[in-house]
Amino acid sequence: TTGQANEYQGYEIPPYSVVGTYGKIEVRQYQQHLMAKVRVSGDQRGAINRGFRVLAGYIFGGNATGEKIAMTAPVAQTQAGGNWEVSFMVPSKYSLSDLPKANSNAIRFEEIKGDRQVVLSFSGRAGTQRLQDKTQELRTLASAQGLAIKGDPHYYFYDDPFTLPRNRRNEVAFSLR
């Protein structure tokens, strides 16, 4: 296995180690980490934008102490029934007990236990159709390796909208059984 990945372009990311690489996909073992999550409705693109705005309000000081909290990567999006869950990792210096309380009651915090995921990375624009295509590609590649996926796909967006599409890091992932 390779070393831990803990940051991306200066942003803290959820800690993981790569436990296997199969062509274009990798299997990652994520360690425990704390996530800030918000549930939003609508289409994929509208949902990520709305969800991100709510979470950004929190980290830019919309919390009980007015504290500015460091941005992390990636912004994650997962389908949750007919809605979407948009989330990102809370910096690892915080625990559930010392995290500033959110002003918005739409935000919840969740301790994610270790999780094994199969991941396909790609650059460029991550519009809804492209995400669907990459999700199908990942299903096919995972199946060919005998990897048993579960649940809905997770979409991970690492870069801000001002990053040139060719330099963007996007990922689609599934948790493994």
Image: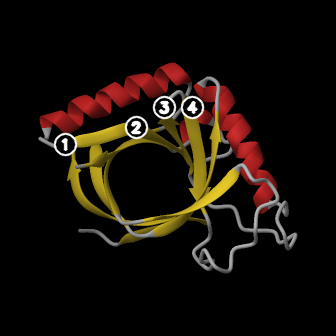
Query: Residue 115, percent across and down?
Result: 34, 59
Q: Between residue 149 and residue 105, name the one nearer to us.
A: 105
Name the residue rendered at 63%, 28% in the picture.
45
- Is residue 81 visible to the viewer in this orientation of the structure? yes
Dots 4, 3 in contact, CB < 8 A: yes
Q: Quadrant of residue 84?
A: top right
Name the residue tied to disc 3: 81
Disc 3 residue type? Gly
Q: Earlier in the sequence, mark 3 or mark 2?
A: 3
Dots 3, 1 in contact, CB < 8 A: no
Q: Earlier in the sequence, mark 1 or mark 2?
A: 1
Name the residue tied to disc 4: 83
Name the residue tied to disc 2: 153
Q: Residue 69 bears which disc, if any?
A: none
Q: Residues within 10 Å of mark 4 (few under 14, many from 20)?
A: some
Q: Residues within 10 Å of mark 3 (few under 14, many from 20)?
A: few
Name the residue tied to disc 1: 148
Query: Which is closer to the viewer, label 3 or label 1?
Result: 3
Q: In the image as oriented, which residue stretches furthest toward the front? A: 105
Disc 1 residue type? Ala
Question: How far, Cα to Cα, is label 3 from label 2?
Answer: 12 Å
Query: Which is closer to the viewer, label 4 or label 1?
Result: 4
Name the residue rendered at 32%, 25% in the picture.
136
Q: Earlier in the sequence, mark 3 or mark 1?
A: 3
Q: Between residue 21 and residue 68, name the one nearer to us.
A: 68
